[in-house]
Image: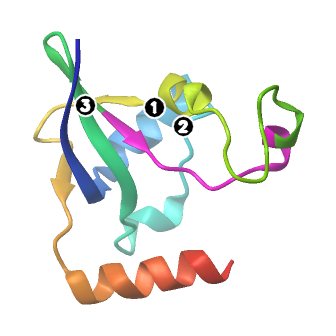
Amino acid sequence: MVEVIKYGFYTVNSDYLEYLNKVDSEVYYNPSYRNSIKPFVGIIVGIENYNYFIPISSAKEKHKKWKNVSDEHFLIYEVIDNSITIDGDIYKYYSDRKKCTYYLYWILRK
């Protein structure tokens, strides 16, 4: 059973992201993550004995080709396929509300 544990902004260890990117190119990694804080918007879910971070991603060109997609919604299964198995040492809840508000504003302007 899937249990939503928490949602919000998270930072993910850059070494772990780099490692995952080498194993699976669908996990995005940019070397600039080492020099600045890059919070991700997402949820943490528990499935059996594992926690997964599921980033909420922005729409991409490839999403237009998916079946059952409209301007109002798109399917989430690909995002779940790209979820990251994590433990508490790998991620940290990002609680700086002022920076989160700015980051959300920046995302929405894109």
Q: Position of residue 56 (x, y in %)?
A: 48, 49
Quadrant in the rendering for residue 27: top right
Estimate how packed mark 2 is, as few (under 14), some (14 to 19) or many (20 or more) residues with alpha carbons within 10 Å.
some
Q: Please name the amino acid that badge 1 sits on.
A: Leu
Which colour scheme appears in the figure? rainbow
Numbered label attached to residue 45:
3
What SS does tag 3 mark?
A: strand
Check the image and report above or below for 103 versus 51.
below
Residue found 52% across the figure and 59% down from its top: 31
Of 47 and 85, the residue lying toward us: 47
Quadrant in the rendering for residue 97: bottom left
Q: Position of residue 99 (x, y in %)?
A: 31, 85
Q: Please name the amino acid that badge 3 sits on.
A: Val
Residue 57 falls inside the magenta stretch: yes
Estimate how packed mark 3 is, as few (under 14), some (14 to 19) or many (20 or more) residues with alpha carbons within 10 Å.
many
Q: Position of residue 108 (x, y in %)?
A: 59, 77
